Structures are given as C-alpha cells and as structure tokens.
Amino acid sequence: MNSWKNLKRNLAQRFLDRCVLRPNRDPIPCENLIRCPIDHPDVAANPHSPGIPRSNVQTEAYVFTTRQDGKLPRLPQPNTTSGAPQEAPQHLAIKFPGTGGRAERSSEAPLNLLYPNLANTTHPPGQHVEVWTWNPPGYGQSTPPARLVDQADFARDFARQVAAACSGPHTQLWLVGNSLGCLSVLHLAANLDAWLPESFPHNQVGCWLRNPPDLAEVVLRISRRYHAERFMRRVVQCLPSNLDAVQNASHSPIPAVFLASQKDRLVLPELQARIHQAYRGDKRIVPLEGLDHDGLLEEQHVPLVVSASHWLADQTKPK
C-alpha cells in the first residue's frame, strides 16, 4: 500500500514539474558575467532528498562584479559553513530567476538602484559589489533534471556556499527573487541558520521580491480554465511544503521589499497580498501600476522602486 502511495505521489510531483517549470538548456552568450560552476556534494549524498542523483551534481551561477582589479570572484567552497573572506564585497546579492529565467540574462539589478551607472563602474576590493545569479537544476548547464522537490535543497546549498565564501562582517546581503524564484528566497529567509555563516549578523540580510506566487493557488486558478480543479486539488497536495510561500513568509524575520504588478494575470494581486500580509518581518510594498507579471518598469515606477531600495539598504546597514 505504501509503495502505491509513493508511486502516486511521485507521478503527481512529476506532473507538477511539467506544469510549473520551464527549463531551458539552450546556450546563451553573455559577455559581462563570469560563469561559476558549483558542486553540491552534501545535497547529492542526502538520503532524504528523493529524486536527486548521487553523483556528478553541479549547478552554475553567473556573477557580476565591480572589483577594480579585475580579479575573479571567489568560487564557493563545498563543505564550508562559515568564513569572513578578506576584501569581501560591500554589497552581495544572491538572485533566483523565475520559471522561464536564466542566469545568463541577469543584470546588476536591484543594486543599480543604489549605485548609479553600476554596469560601467569599478570599485576597490572591499568596496565593490557582487551579484550571483543562479541557474537551478535543469536550467542552462546545471544538473540534475528540474524538479520542484529538489529546489529548496539546492537553493539552500547554493546560498550557503556563496555566503560562506563571499560575505564579510560588513557585507549587506540581499536575497533577490522574481516570480517562482521568490519561493527559494522565502525558504531561505525562513531558515537563516540553515545556510548563513554562524558569525554573520542576521540584521544585514534583506529580501527583494517581485510577484511571489502562492503556487498551489496559482495552479488551481489555471486549472479552472480546463475544468480540472477537482483533480488538481489532490495533485497540489504533493507540492513541496518547503516551498509554501505563505508559511515561509510567516517565519521570515528579515526586512523585505515586495514589488507587486497590479495588472498581473498570472499571480493575481490578491494572491500576492496573502503573502504580504503573512510576512513576519518589516516590509515595504511597492505597487507597480499598469504592469503585467513580467512587465518592464516604466518612468512612473522608478521613484518608488529607488526609494524602496534605499529603505532596504538602510534596514540592512551594518550596525
């Protein structure tokens, strides 16, 4: 009986992967970013992570840096949990794209809101900024296959390695998520001790999120178009609990900025509002009037977004 239940659950999870994830492995040229492969031996050896291959597990990040000396960013080191590297960046952003996103297309946002003309600026080591954008499993050259059940484990290990290798006592660390990537950010925000270096101050960590989804509700809303809601209500029960946006929000103590597209047809504003209301930490909500889910910021939005970035910078300033 248990084996039959496990089979049904596994099939439901695979079906959800096909519904939600949009992995793409096409090569994308990028000139201004540095590719950094990341091994995950701890995750690969975890017997409680079903579906994860036990060998050759590697994801990748693409890094933007303003180091004046042109030195490559320090590679994350496996099996490390703490560290305060010399010449650590003043500002470190760890970014998680949406379901159709790729790290190769990443920009220096949102740090460019704090530092004008950041793309053409260099800083002395220790005063520079770094932006690490992740390709989750199945995207780009990251392995293994894309699976929702594996997302939180790999995201946590990626953030742990980057934070351990790249953050110092005066670094401001921002977790940045777009759409589906917000689920990884909220998981990390709710479980700081599971990935932050032991000596790193929690008050120097903040979140920057755009259009975070309550995934079960989004899937159910779309299923109604196909008269499949009754069936999908059983299926969404198999979504990973560690990606529950509302639950994680209620356990996230760090300051956060929420960018909310007011004409979002994928993640309706009222669904986003549930996450905003549940969020435990200090927050600032920035309504993006007239924008759909992936709409580009317009001139009218810039002052609000810039103000929010300075608020978050003030909140995460080293004490």
Image: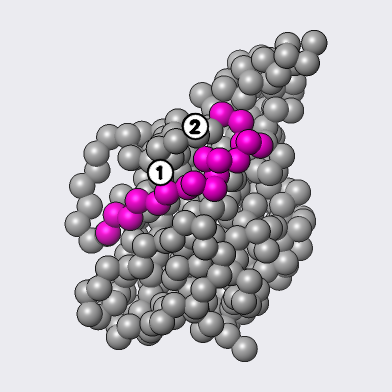
Give the residue number, with chain letter if any, for mark 2.
Answer: 53
Label 2 near label 1: C-beta < 8 Å? no
| x and y percentages locating residue 256 in the rendered image | 63, 66
- Sequence-earlier tag: 1 or 2: 2
| x and y percentages locating residue 238 in the rendered image | 70, 27
Closer to us: 117 or 52: 52
Tell me if mark 2 has few (under 14), some (14-19) or many (20+) residues whose alpha carbon lies within 10 angstroms of its own. Answer: some
**For the point 73% across and 11% down, which residue is it?**
4
Look at the numbered disc 2 and give the secondary structure of its residue: loop
Residue 111 visible here: yes
Reply above or below: 55 against 76: above
Within the image, what quadrant is residue 127 found in? bottom left
Q: Identify the magenta region.
A: 34-51
Label at residue 133: none
Given the image, on which type of amino acid does mark 2 rest? Answer: Pro
Reply above or below: 39 against 190: above
